[in-house]
Image (cartoon, rainbow, N blue to C red):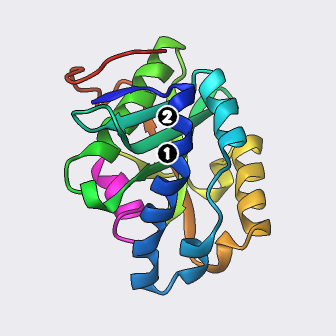
């Protein structure tokens, strides 16, 4: 089930982020795995603004989450993380689709994100979901700022790209969605 995050969900999200970081060790990206997760306070900003969603188990326990921003008139996916114990169930794709529905309601034309190019569950995965690389000379000022911020935090130690897909281009029906907003 995908739904809007509630304040009570937030305490579970840092553990999901830590678990989602572990697979980066298998590709030599220990620094990514060791990066501190967002704090509950940081997550609360997204939740209060209606820009945080969770994937849940049948008993409504969070097992994945997504965060979004509006950057230069587009919906920017700031984070998508799924506990690897629940991988392979299309939860990441469902979370992205939920962000896309949110963007469509606001008439935002694009979904954007930044990601690692050589990590199988990053750029290749997003490409399968309909995202395409944005050439560096087409980055908006807000996206350039995000990339600069990532570089300041060492994420440019591995090849990264900005990707986007048109809002509404791949939206499936809304099964298993409950808005608790």
Above or below, 7 against 95 in this view is above
Q: Position of residue 94 (x, y in %)?
A: 30, 36
Disc number for residue 12: 1
Q: Residue at x 56, y 42 (%)?
A: 11
Q: Is residue 62 left or right of residue 155?
A: left
Tell me the quarter of the picture where residue 33 sits: bottom right
Q: Is residue 97 left or right of residue 50?
A: left
Q: Residue at x 57, y 67 (%)?
A: 160
Q: Nearer the viewer, residue 101 or 67?
A: 67
Disc number for residue 82: none
Above or below, 82 against 2 in this view is below
In magenta stretch: residue 123: yes
Q: Say whether residue 115 is visible.
A: yes
Above or below, 93 against 179 in this view is below
Residue farthest to the bottom, as pictured? 28
Magenta segment range?
117-129
Q: Is residue 166 left or right of residue 87?
A: right
In magenta stretch: residue 82: no
- SS at badge 2: helix
Contact, mark 1 vs mark 2 (Cβ under 8 Å): yes
Q: Quadrant of the N terminus?
A: top left
- SS at badge 1: helix
Characterize the local packing of mark 1: few (<14), some (14-19) or many (20 or more) Cα atoms within 10 angstroms.
Answer: some
Q: Position of residue 32 (x, y in %)?
A: 57, 73
Residue assigned mark 2: 9
Q: Residue at x 55, y 61 (%)?
A: 161
Q: Position of residue 73 (x, y in %)?
A: 65, 26
Q: Residue at x 33, y 29 (%)?
A: 2
């Amino acid at each position: 089930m995908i739904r809007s995050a509630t304040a009570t969900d937030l305490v579970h999200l840092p553990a999901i982020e830590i678990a989602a970081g572990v697979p980066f060790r298998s590709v030599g990206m220990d620094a990514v795995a060791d990066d501190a997760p967002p704090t509950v306070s940081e997550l609360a900003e997204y939740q209060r603004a209606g820009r945080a969603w969770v994937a849940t188990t049948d008993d409504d326990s969070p097992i994945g989450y997504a965060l979004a921003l509006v950057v230069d008139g587009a919906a920017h996916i700031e984070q998508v993380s799924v506990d690897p114990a629940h991988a392979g169930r299309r939860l990441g794709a469902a979370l992205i689709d939920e962000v896309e529905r949110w963007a469509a309601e606001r008439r935002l034309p694009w979904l954007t994100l930044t990601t690692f190019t050589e990590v199988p569950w990053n750029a290749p995965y997003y490409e399968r979901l309909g995202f395409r690389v944005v050439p560096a000379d087409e980055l908006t000022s807000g996206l350039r700022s995000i990339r600069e911020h990532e570089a300041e935090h060492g994420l440019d130690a591995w090849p990264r790209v900005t990707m986007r897909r048109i809002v509404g281009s791949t939206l499936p029906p809304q099964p298993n969605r409950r808005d608790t907003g």
